[in-house]
Each structure stands twice: as structure tokens, then as C-alpha cells.
Image (cartoon, rainbow, N blue to C red):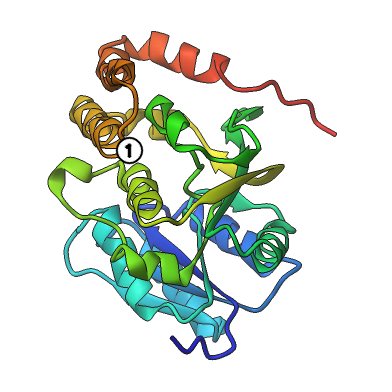
Amino acid sequence: MEYNNISISIIMGIYNCADTLQEALDSLYAQTFQNFEIILCDDASCDATYQIALDNASRNSHIVLLKNEKNLGLNATLNKCLKSARGKYIARMDGDDISVASRLEIEFNFLESHLEYAIVSCNMLHFDENGDFGQSGIMGGEARTQDFPKGTPFCHAPCMIRHEAYEAVNGYSVEERLLRVEDYHLWYKMYLKGYIGYNLPDVLYKMRDDQQAAARRKFKFSFNIAYVKFLIVKDFKLPLFNYIYCLRPIIVALLPKILYNFLHKSKMHSYTSR
């Protein structure tokens, strides 16, 4: 594939994020690495998200703006972004998060110098309306298939992936039973094809993890997670005891919201401002 000298395509499915989108885009404008394009696709937002995106596109020639006439969900929206992407690497970003200024440069340099890996991601700093409260606990190093049943091996939003790996698996799967687990299933598909990934120990991304984010948790999606875990154990031919992990998302989904939020925050690694 010809990449037209564009190193990175940043794909963003945006939906009802009018209050946060500008801050997210500003964090990309401030990157130390600037050879990128931004593919924005509005998923039929009900607020001013599209207008904000349109204003940015009118002022920035490296933004490609797409729009869904009806809400399609993140899986299909990201696939639409991929069809327009021209970069050698594909980076993810959400419309309510923030990329640290050095994120793209560090991830790009890693993939350029480590040809054995198709995926690179990093740890995330979580923040809400009260400020930073913790960071994700993804272990640094190569992600191993035997660790997949425990949970997604990579943070999705701060990842960067070789374009060819996306093409090899036909992008994101769009079945109803894979909604909200598009990333987990993507890693499963890529590893089955022989593409592997690495987690950097650096914290290069800030994920908004506020009350609205917690409210997006729905019981039906726990079955989607369990389904992907089942596929992982079966198709990677992992030891049978790993099927126990298929039950965990359903049990967690049954927890009262107060208890869920407490456990969610308590599992974060402590964060101290530097």
C-alpha cells in the first residue's frame, strides 16, 4: 500500500463529546511528532460534536472529517476511518481523552526500530472531574497469549498499530455480540494471524474516567467480554482452567454501581504528581 509519505493516521470515532473534543484535538496539535493525519468520524452525535470537528477541519488541512447519517457504533465507525487512512501506522485516540505531547514520537520510534512487533501501547493516567486518581496496571513488555484470558492485553485508546496488521484482519469486527469489546477481539484476531505487540511502561495517555464513563457500563456487554474470552481460550488452545475467566465479567457486572466504582478506582496504581 502507498502511504503518501504520511507516517501516522490517527483514527477517532467521535460521539457526543462536544465538551471534551477540543482539548483532545489540542493535545494532538501539540505533539512533538507532526507527520500525521487525523481521521474524525462523527457517529450521528446529538450535541455540537460535529460542528466543533468541522471548525477544526476548516482550519487544519491534515484533518479528514467523516459523518455517519445514523449511529453505527464504534466498531463500524472506526472501520470507516480506516478506509480513509493513508498512514504507515494507525494510532487510536478518543474524543474525551488527552495524548501526552511525546506519545506519537515514542510509539512511532518504537515500531520503526522493533520490526518484530505490530502493536505498541502504553499505560494510561486516569482522571475525572476531581483530577488525576491513578494509572492503569498494564505490565510492560511483550504481551503473551497465556495472559489474554485475564483481560485485554493492551490499552486500546493509546495504541499504535502497523497498517498492514489492520488490513490482514479486515479491521474491527462489527457483530452485535462484539460491541464494546472491539479492541479485545482485535488483539485476538491479530495474534491468530501472527502479529504480536508490546506494552511500553511509559504513561503517554490520559483517559477520562468520570461518572459518565462509568454510566456506559451495561450488563449486556459483560456477555460480549465473556464471549471473547471463550474464543481466546479455545482458539489459542490454552489450559482448560482459563475458562474460569469467562465468568468474571458477568460477576463484576452484577456488582452494585457504588461497589464497582470503588473496586475500579482501587485497582489503579497510585499516581503521584511530578
- What residue would you read off at disc 1? 236
State left or right for residue 38 relative to residue 180. right
Q: Residue 138 occupies which quadrant of the picture? A: top right
Indicate left or right for 20 with 260 as reference: right
Tell me the kind of residue under disc 1. Answer: Phe
Quarter placement of the C terminus: top right
What residue is drawn where x is 46% and y is 71%? 163
Q: Nearer the viewer, residue 260 or 3?
A: 3
Residue drawn at (29%, 42%) of the image = 180
Asked which quadrant contains residue 167, the reply is bottom left
- Look at the picture and state if 66 lies above or below 204: below
User: Looking at the image, can residue 46 be seen?
Assistant: no
Is residue 92 visible in the rendered image? The answer is yes
Is 229 situated above or below 258?
Answer: below
Query: Which residue is found at the position 48% from the left and 76% from the top?
Result: 55
Image position, residue 126 (x, y; %): 59, 34
Q: Quadrant of the N terminus?
A: bottom left
Tell me if residue 89 comes above or below residue 49 in the rendering. below
Q: Position of residue 15 (x, y in %)?
A: 34, 55
* Residue found 72% across the figure and 26% down from its top: 271
Farthest residue in the right direction? Answer: 274
Secondary structure of the residue carrying tag 1 is loop
Decide: few, some or many residues near mark 1? Use Cα within 10 Å; few <14, some 14-19, many ≥20: some
Residue 152 in the image: state x and y as whole percent.
Answer: 43, 36
Q: Position of residue 268 (x, y in %)?
A: 59, 22
